[in-house]
Image: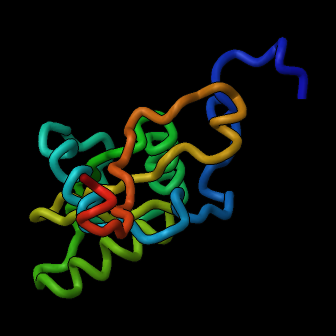
């Protein structure tokens, strides 16, 4: 691919994001501290994608992925979620798996999703917008003083 002719990131160049196989980034499960940090950042956000009664389509998946690539942490308003809490959480977690993101939180009909930049984005020179707290290391009291 000739980078000299590209205008903007690769996901703006007619790539059908709904067809890509994506795993969440980072691949490891987020810690409680990391999830709490992301929840605090998400508090001030407004939904950037809305899912209507038609549900999750290829176009919705592509738009969520595009927003994750751009923002990393997003809110999705989903009008068609189940009325019961347990199926709602399952639907939200399924959505996260489908789009290749981490499911952070569900508040009412709003799903919070997170995906760090992948290696390809980092190679293009894009640095992460969100720095997650590190996983705690086990040190003794003597080592930390």
State how many labels appear: 0
Find residue 70 and report its horizontal and vertical position in percent. 47, 34
- Residue reaching furthest right? 2
Q: Which residue is found at the position 33% from the left and 50% from the top? A: 133
Viewer-nearest residue: 51 or 33: 33
Q: Quadrant of residue 91?
A: bottom left
Q: Quadrant of residue 31?
A: bottom left
67 sits to left or right of 24: left
- Residue reaching furthest top? 4
* 73, above or below 91, in the image: above
Q: Which residue is found at the position 42% from the left and 43% from the top? A: 72
Looking at the image, what colour scheme do you see? rainbow
Q: Which residue is found at the position 41% from the left and 66% from the top? A: 96
Asked if residue 24 can be seen in this view, the reply is yes
Q: In which quarter of the image is residue 109?
A: bottom left
Find residue 19 and report its horizontal and vertical position in percent. 67, 59
Viewer-nearest residue: 59 or 107: 107
Asked if residue 13 can be seen in this view, the reply is no
The N terminus: image quadrant: top right
């Amino acid at each position: 691919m000739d980078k000299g002719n590209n205008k903007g990131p690769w996901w703006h160049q007619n790539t059908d994001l709904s067809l890509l196989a994506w795993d969440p980034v980072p691949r490891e499960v987020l810690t409680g501290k990391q999830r709490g940090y992301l929840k605090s950042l998400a508090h001030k956000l407004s939904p950037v994608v809305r899912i209507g009664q038609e549900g999750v389509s290829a176009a919705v998946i592509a738009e969520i992925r595009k927003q994750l690539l751009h923002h990393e942490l997003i809110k999705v308003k989903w009008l068609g979620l189940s009325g019961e809490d347990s199926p709602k959480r399952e639907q939200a977690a399924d959505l996260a798996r489908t789009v290749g993101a981490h499911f952070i939180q569900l508040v009412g009909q709003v799903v919070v999703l997170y995906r760090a930049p992948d290696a390809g984005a980092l190679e293009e020179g894009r640095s992460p917008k969100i720095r997650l707290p590190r996983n705690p290391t086990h040190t003794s009291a003597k080592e930390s003083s």
